[in-house]
């Protein structure tokens, strides 16, 4: 062989990911995109690739013959991947002045082979090019969210095949989730069966949210009626929302005890503080000395390393030391994007689940008081 064929390397990478999906019950997404070359320098390209590697947990990044870049996102459903790509686009725009010209995103299906997967990605790339403006076209093997027909057709097809969704609402800023059964969907009206407690809660709520692994974005729906004795709820005006409070707040909690945190600045300083709230992909920190924090971030360097000990069950703790990027300052807080690996991500999710259980118990007592009164 005189030289390495890039197409053969690409096929080997894709086939390996296809094999992984068939052997494991883990969601795996594939992203292909092209940079806008009009203002792209070598330095910007290098830093953009660095940012991409950090924000995709150092997943494979392959340059294809057509000029697009290909990478993968493991253990995330489509709606989460869509949000992550939007975050990456925002980071590229803010920190490097670089835009994605077009792109395609899909979840690899167990029924896919190389030809069907690549044909779907090529179709999405063409749709994205036609749309212009850096729009990322996405979907699954069954649902193409860039094609014409509107949301009503998508919902009708979806509910014809799925009888369960995950419902989300908020209590004291904490999202409460519950898997519910779909009783019927017709002419934009969705009837669901939930728990007595959730139905009583929704009776006084104007709207709710729901998600499903096959839906790329959170759906917001108005609560038309709730019947607590039958644990039934009627939802109308279903619509996809781009900036979802569920994606933003679903995994965000405020600790019920002080969690000390240390920020290692690029200039060598260390800032002490406490965690105000945390999510799988972000931290809000209250520095003990905001003047020192302002000095730490006086230059354009926003990358830092953050260390803290996160409580677990039975008074155990996990030590975290992860990279982060300062997004903005909010009053007395610094808001960071964080990039935990799979192990740390699971630990954060476990901690959030503990906090969620505590609030659910409080809410159940409130519902019990509602019935007793």
Image (cartoon, rainbow, N blue to C red):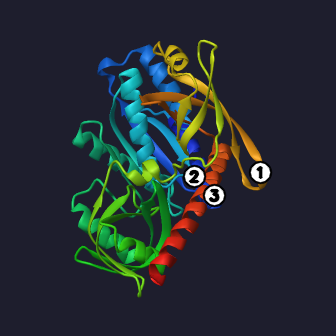
Q: CA distance from mark 1 to mark 3?
A: 12 Å
**Secondary structure of the residue carrying numbered label 3:** helix
Q: Position of residue 367 (x, y in %)?
A: 48, 75
Up-down relation of residue 147 to residue 96 (above or below)? below
Q: Which residue is mark 1?
A: 315
Q: Nearer the viewer, residue 240 or 150?
A: 240
**Secondary structure of the residue carrying numbered label 2:** loop
Q: Residues within 10 Å of mark 1 (few under 14, many from 20)?
A: few
Q: Which residue is mark 3?
A: 354
Q: Which residue is mark 2?
A: 75
First in residue order: circle 1 vs circle 3 = 1
Q: CA distance from mark 3 to mark 2?
A: 21 Å
Up-down relation of residue 159 to residue 120 (above or below)? below
Residue located at (57% from left, 52% from top): 75
Residue located at (38% from left, 34% from top): 89
Query: What's the mark number on residue 225?
Result: none
Residue located at (27% from left, 40% from top): 129
């Amino acid at each position: 062989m005189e030289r390495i064929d890039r197409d053969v390397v690409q096929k080997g990478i894709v086939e390996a990911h296809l094999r992984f999906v068939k052997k494991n019950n883990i969601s795996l997404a594939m992203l292909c995109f092209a940079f806008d070359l009009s203002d792209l320098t070598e330095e910007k390209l290098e830093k953009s690739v660095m940012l991409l590697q950090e924000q995709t947990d150092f997943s494979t990044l392959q340059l294809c013959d057509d000029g697009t870049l290909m990478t993968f996102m493991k253990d995330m459903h489509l709606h989460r991947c869509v949000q992550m790509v939007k975050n990456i686009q925002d980071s590229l725009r803010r920190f490097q002045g670089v835009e994605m010209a077009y792109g395609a995103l899909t979840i690899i299906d167990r029924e896919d082979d190389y030809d069907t997967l690549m044909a779907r990605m090529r179709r999405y790339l063409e749709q994205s090019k036609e749309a212009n403006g850096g729009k990322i076209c996405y979907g699954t093997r069954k649902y193409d969210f860039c094609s014409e027909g509107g949301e009503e057709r998508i919902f009708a097809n979806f509910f014809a095949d799925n009888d369960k969704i995950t419902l989300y609402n908020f209590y004291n800023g904490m999202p409460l989730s519950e898997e519910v059964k779909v009783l019927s969907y017709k002419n934009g009206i969705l009837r669901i069966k939930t728990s007595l407690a959730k139905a009583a809660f929704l009776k006084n709520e104007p709207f709710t949210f729901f998600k499903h692994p096959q839906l790329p974005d959170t759906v917001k729906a108005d609560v038309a009626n709730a019947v607590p004795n039958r644990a039934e709820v009627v939802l109308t005006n279903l619509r996809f929302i781009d900036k979802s409070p569920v994606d933003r707040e679903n995994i965000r909690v405020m600790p019920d005890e002080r969690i000390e945190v240390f920020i290692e600045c690029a200039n060598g300083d260390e800032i002490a503080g406490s965690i105000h709230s945390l999510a799988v992909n972000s931290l809000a920190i209250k520095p003990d000395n905001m003047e020192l924090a302002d000095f730490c971030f006086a230059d354009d360097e926003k990358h830092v390393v953050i260390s803290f000990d996160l409580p677990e069950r039975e008074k155990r703790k996990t030590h975290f030391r992860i990279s982060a990027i300062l997004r903005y300052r909010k009053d007395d807080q610094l808001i960071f994007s964080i990039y935990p690996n799979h192990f740390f991500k699971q630990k954060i999710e476990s901690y959030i689940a503990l906090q969620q259980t505590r609030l659910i118990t409080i809410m159940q007592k409130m519902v019990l008081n509602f019935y007793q009164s």
